[in-house]
């Protein structure tokens, strides 16, 4: 079955439902997933891999939905501390079924061969940046966004720790509002994560992540259904 194309448009929010465990990926009814999100993230670093029979991979039952695949590096929240080769191996295995691939901006150089393969397949990817220690200033995020764009990414995603510092919301909101011609996704982590994710969606964050099942994949994350309902109630069509 051919992959389903995903159209990232600057300022148009989409809900990403992210699986944090294999049990949820195997068991949640597809109609429930469809009602909860616009596309599904499969975290390959969180799933058991050896041995993996790709012809019976658990995500094959979701092929009627757009699939975003991630194999996160350890320094940015990935499980198993997988090196670049291991992450590329997992991502290469899903190229034919993926709608979108997530590659960290910090991994662009070491994963250049994969990026070239994605370009040859006309498969879009997003450049991502995660800071679990603190909220990065807009200048840092702008530099990361430029690196992603220059490398050919179809969009940029940033997730930053906010703690309880409400003062950080204003400069981060301004950074997001300035992204007029390039898809940008921004989300907070920690105690202010829920309010920040709805706020940033209102301001045009393109990919807005919530979890599917019982296991959040980031600190302070909404469930995908809760996030979709909250954004639908606050973001004008």
Image (cartoon, rainbow, N blue to C red):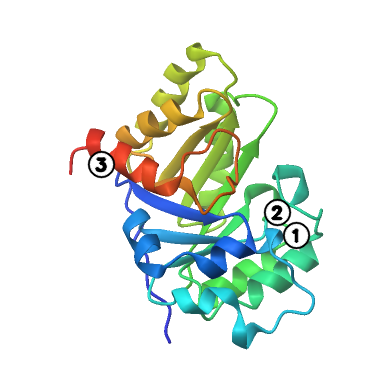
Q: Nearer the viewer, residue 92 or 139?
A: 92
Taking the image as shown, residue 149 lies to the left or right of residue 204, namely right
What element does badge 2 sit on?
A: helix
**Given the current orientation, which residue lies at the most extreme left position?**
237
Asked whether the beta carbons under mark 2 and mark 1 sit within 8 Å of each other, the answer is: yes
Image x and y of residue 69, in percent: 56, 64
Earlier in the chain: of badge 3 and badge 2, it is 2
Q: Which residue is mark 3?
A: 232
Q: Distance from label 1 to label 3 (Cα)?
A: 39 Å
Image x and y of residue 141, in percent: 55, 33
Q: Reply above or below: 36 against 195.
A: below
Q: Which residue is mark 2?
A: 107
Q: Quadrant of the C terminus?
A: top left
- Single out the mark in the foreground, 1 or 3: 3
- Single out the mark in the foreground, 3 or 2: 3
* Residue 73 appears in the figure: yes
Query: Where on the picture, by quarter, is residue 47?
Result: bottom right
What element does badge 1 sit on?
A: loop
* Residue 182 appears in the figure: no
Which labelled disc corresponds to residue 185?
none
**Residue at 51% across, 56% down:** 153
**Residue at 53% across, 81% down:** 96
Q: Which residue is mark 1?
A: 110
**Residue at 53% across, 72% down:** 119
Callout 2 crowding tier (Cα within 10 Å): few <14, some 14–19, many ≥20:
some
Q: Nearer the viewer, residue 123 or 59?
A: 59
Callout 1 crowding tier (Cα within 10 Å): few <14, some 14–19, many ≥20:
few
Q: Distance from label 3 to label 2 (Cα)?
A: 34 Å
Q: Quadrant of the N terminus?
A: bottom left
Q: Reply above or below: 169 against 237.
A: above
Q: Nearer the viewer, residue 148 or 94?
A: 94
């Amino acid at each position: 079955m051919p992959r389903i194309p995903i159209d990232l448009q600057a300022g148009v929010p989409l809900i990403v439902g992210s699986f944090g465990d294999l049990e949820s990926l195997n068991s949640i009814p597809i109609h429930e997933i469809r009602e909860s999100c616009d596309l599904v993230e499969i975290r390959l670093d969180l799933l058991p891999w050896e041995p993996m029979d790709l012809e019976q991979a658990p995500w094959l039952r979701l092929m009627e939905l757009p699939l975003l695949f991630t194999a996160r590096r350890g320094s940015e929240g990935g499980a198993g501390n997988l090196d670049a080769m291991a992450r590329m191996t997992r991502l290469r295995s899903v190229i034919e079924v993926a709608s979108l691939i997530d590659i960290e901006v910090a991994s662009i150089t070491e994963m250049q061969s994969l990026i070239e393969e994605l370009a040859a397949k006309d498969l879009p990817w997003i450049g991502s940046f995660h800071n679990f220690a603190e909220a990065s200033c807009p200048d840092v995020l702008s530099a990361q966004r430029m690196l992603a764009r220059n490398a050919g990414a179809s969009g940029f995603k940033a997730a930053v720790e906010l703690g309880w510092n409400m003062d950080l919301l204003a400069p981060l909101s301004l950074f997001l509002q300035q992204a007029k011609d390039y898809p940008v996704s921004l989300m907070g982590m920690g105690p202010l994560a829920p309010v920040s994710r709805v706020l940033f969606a209102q301001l045009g964050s393109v990919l807005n992540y919530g979890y599917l099942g019982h296991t959040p994949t980031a600190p302070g994350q909404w469930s995908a259904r809760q996030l979709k309902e909250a954004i639908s109630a606050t973001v004008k069509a």
